[in-house]
Image (cartoon, grey):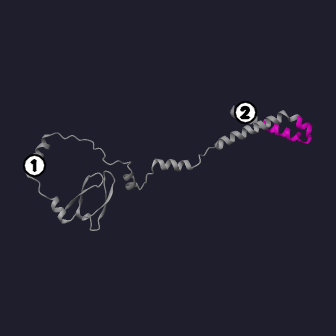
């Protein structure tokens, strides 16, 4: 069973993949380091021969001697792929980044939604009702003199308001 050396197209990380895994139609591979996906096709015999050239043994002995005598230090490898680049986001997640100028122009077309909201409307309604009842209280006797049949209704409204005020006051205290 032979293994094939595969390089990531994006970050150039090398992977060892068994030949039996990659068929003639190719196989979709994904880099474990940067997440890049690509289709890998089998390497032809000519390419394999150039890869499998024998290495000079005297050089390998020097490398082995140096590596055994020196102390190994692990360095943290920096990521070579920019995770926020347009190409990477499009390839990995299918996202298309628009220019800032086009985003601003599309936002300027939208009307800014300005409003006071639900609680603002409730506060305005309460202020309106308090002002109406205040004006009615100031002019209560004038209205009763002009329209005597409204006296029972006006007294009923103020009695109800007094009951509501007492209940709210008792809830607070």
| As drawn, 123 above or below 39 | above
Residue 31 position, x and y percent, is 31, 54
**Quadrant into which the C terminus falls:** top right
Query: What residue would you read off at disc 1?
Result: 59
Residue 147 position, x and y percent, is 91, 40
Give the image quarter of residue 30: bottom left
Query: From this viewpoint, which residue is outermost toward the left?
Result: 58
Query: Which span of residues is magenta-colored?
Result: 142-161
Query: From this viewpoint, which residue is outermost toward the bottom?
Result: 24
Q: Please say whether residue 20 is one of the residues in the magenta stretch.
A: no
Q: Please say whether residue 151 is one of the residues in the magenta stretch.
A: yes
Query: From this viewpoint, which residue is outermost toward the top?
Result: 173
Q: Secondary structure at mark 1?
A: helix
Q: Secondary structure at mark 2?
A: helix
- Crowding at dot 1, Cα within 10 Å, few <14 / some 14-19 / many 20+, comes out as few
Residue nearest the viewer, comparing 38 with 168 = 38
| As drawn, 159 above or below 42 | above
Please, what is the dominant secondary structure of the magenta stretch? helix
Residue 9 position, x and y percent, is 29, 55
Query: What residue would you read off at disc 2?
Result: 169
- The residue that appears at 88% across and 41% down in the rendered structure is 150
Give the image quarter of residue 54: bottom left
- The residue that appears at 15% across and 40% down in the rendered structure is 70
Position of 156 compared to 46: left or right?
right
């Amino acid at each position: 069973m032979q293994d094939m050396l595969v390089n990531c197209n994006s970050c150039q990380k090398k992977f060892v993949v068994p030949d039996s895994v990659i068929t003639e139609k190719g196989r979709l591979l994904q880099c474990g380091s940067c997440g890049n996906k690509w289709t890998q096709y089998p390497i032809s015999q000519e390419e394999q021969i150039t890869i499998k050239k024998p290495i000079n043994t005297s050089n390998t002995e020097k490398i082995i001697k140096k590596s055994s005598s020196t102390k190994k230090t692990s360095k943290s490898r920096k990521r070579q792929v920019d995770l926020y680049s347009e190409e990477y986001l499009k390839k990995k997640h299918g996202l298309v980044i628009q220019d800032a100028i086009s985003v601003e122009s599309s936002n300027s077309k939208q009307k800014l939604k300005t409003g006071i909201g639900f609680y603002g409307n409730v506060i305005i309604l309460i202020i309106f009702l308090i002002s109406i009842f205040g004006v009615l209280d100031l002019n209560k006797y004038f209205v009763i003199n002009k329209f005597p049949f409204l006296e029972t209704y006006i007294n009923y409204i103020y009695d109800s308001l007094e009951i509501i005020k007492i209940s709210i006051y008792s809830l607070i205290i």
